Amino acid sequence: MKIAIGSDHAGFELKEFIRGMLEDEDMEVIDAGPFEFNEHDDYPIYAAGVARLVSEGKADRGILICDSGIGMDIVANKFRNIRSALVHDPELARLTRRHNDSNVLCMGALFVDDNTAGMIVSNWLDEPFSGADRHKRRLAEIADLERQLVR
């Protein structure tokens, strides 16, 4: 699985931790930056970079981290075929995969420590989409809405 990852300045340390964790598990990681801490790094640039990689099929999934996770989530969901979820709890990570087939995970560095973030990422990567008819129907409804919207 190919995972794109990015953060802003507030999420940089957690991004580096998660990137290392993924690489230790022999995952292919595309680091969309930043590559060093800079307090002026803003979330829209990095969120767009990761979301674009997933939207275009150059990455299977994406992980985004800022201070709250909210800004990253908002930006990621602007891209076609992105189902981004803001998660601060390991069980919600499972649910967003099982029910929503989320392909971008957003976390807030202010709300999760390294250990919790590691559990969230592991759960999110390991949990399959359930494929239940009701969930497929809802995802089809979302895709229909995307096609109707001008971007």
Image: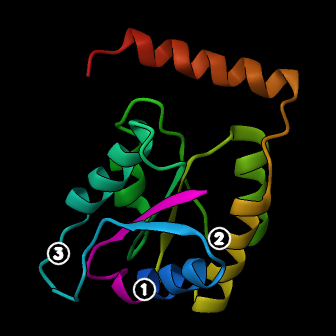
- Give the side of residue 122 with respect to residue 22, left or right: right
Residue 41: image tag? 3
Residue 121: image tag? 2
In the rendered image, residue 65, in percent from the top left (x then y), is placed at: 42, 71
Q: If you read the primary sequence from the N terminus, does the residue marked by circle 1 or circle 2 appear first? A: 1
Start and end of the magenta stretch?
Answer: 1-13
Q: If you read the primary sequence from the N terminus, does the residue marked by circle 1 or circle 3 appear first? A: 1
Q: Work out how far the residue at label 3 is from the one at label 2, CA to CA, in angstroms.
A: 23 Å
- Give the side of residue 85 with respect to residue 43, left or right: right
- The residue depicted at 51 percent of the width and 60 percent of the height is 3
User: In front of the other: label 1 or label 3?
Assistant: 1
Q: If you read the primary sequence from the N terminus, does the residue marked by circle 3 or circle 2 appear first? A: 3
In the rendered image, residue 48, in percent from the top left (x then y), is placed at: 28, 50
Based on the picture, tell me whether residue 127 belongs to the magenta stretch: no
- The residue depicted at 23 percent of the width and 57 percent of the height is 44
- Give the side of residue 126 with respect to residue 64, left or right: right
